Image (cartoon, helix red, strand yellow):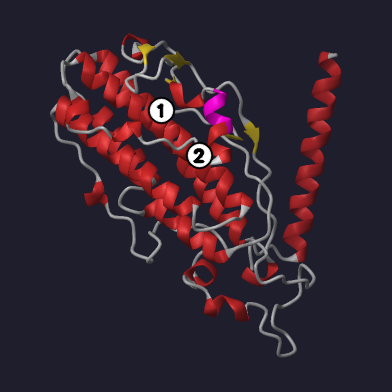
Amino acid sequence: MFYHAQKLINPIVADEPDPSAANALQEGLGGQFGEMRTMMQYLFQSFNFRGDGKAYHDLIQGIAIEEISHVELISKTISRLLDGAPEYHGKKFDVPGKGGAATMEMAKEQQNPHHFIVGAQGALPVDAAGNPWCGSYVHCNGNLILDLLDNLVLESTGRLQKCRIYQMSKNKTLRATVAFLIARDEAHEMAFAKALETLGVDWAKILPIPKFDSSKYPEVKKLIDAGINREQYHFRLDGSQMAAIFSGPAPANDGTELITLAEPKQSYPDPGAPERPEEFAPGLDPELQALADALVEVKVKIQKSAKESKE
């Protein structure tokens, strides 16, 4: 059972729309080493976990729950990069294209026109080539060491690919989200490497990947300096044994310490997405819009009354 707070795990930085950057970022969402795979792989490993190694279960499940927030963040970032790309300035209830204007003519020239035809300027569960995300990407081996090794390779490969995506665009919206994911991928590398160490596996001889230094990217360095690459969250309301593993010296052997927390120290408002009349989204006609506006007005009055009564 999961609970959801209507917050983002990292802020989405404003910049100009950039459909090409959005498509590159699709690889980090729906690619073979993207956030959808990490989310589903760790969730299924936790759902199928057998035996009494609760600390290992809690570690895998805590990261899995965080990955849900990463899928949310990267999806909303892609939507932000797409939003307003056609620069439609018509009125809300106009018929876009009326009078011979092709309001989304630019969409047919993009690397993935499905962002406009199918996704209504939103993220899709595909990779950067438009291939649908595939459940066969998910590895749940039923062997703890094998699963942990698989997860370490997955995080390391995903981190490497995100560094490449970072270098594909100067767009601040893309770079801020990708930088955060690079830093968190490093934390997850440390988590799975530490878990393997507690099981007596000398992973560093075969997988020296966490030694890769991503602090050369200024946005990533800022996050590393804040220590988020050495934190891990369990998101449990009923307690967790994650700290039995994720604590003590980091496997990177750089003098840093691993810290387990219940949740991230900060979360950020989710501003929502504006309407896109040219996509007929959300598609309310004037009568339904009037009803929706009235409902919002009543809700605001109730919230204001409740706040005043508390004071």
**Which residue corresponds to the image point at 53% horizontal and 60% vertical from the top-left?**
21
Residue 138 coordinates in the image, percent (x, y) = 24, 44
Residue 247 coordinates in the image, percent (x, y) = 37, 11
**Which residue corresponds to the image point at 77% horizontal and 37% vertical from the top-left?**
299
Q: Which residue reaches farthest bottom?
A: 100
Q: Residues within 10 Å of mark 2 (few under 14, many from 20)?
A: few
C-alpha gap between disc 1 and disc 2: 17 Å
- Amino acid type at image mark 1: Ala
- The answer to whether residue 284 is above or below residue 237 is below
**Which residue is denoted by mark 2 in the rendering?**
216
Q: Nearer the viewer, residue 32 or 68?
A: 32
**Which residue corresponds to the image point at 32% horizontal and 39% vertical from the top-left?**
156
- Amino acid type at image mark 2: Lys
Which quadrant is the N terminus positioned in? Answer: top left
**Which residue is denoted by mark 1 in the rendering?**
187
Highlighted range, magenta: 222-226
Q: Is residue 33 magenta?
A: no
Question: Of helix, strand and loop, which mostly describes the magenta segment?
Answer: helix
- Horizontal side, residue 16 vs residue 119: left or right: right
- Horizontal side, residue 140 vs residue 87: left or right: left
Image quarter of residue 269: top right
Image quarter of residue 219: top right
Residue 90 coordinates in the image, percent (x, y) = 78, 73
- Identify the secondary structure beneath mark 1: helix
Q: Nearer the viewer, residue 306 or 149?
A: 149
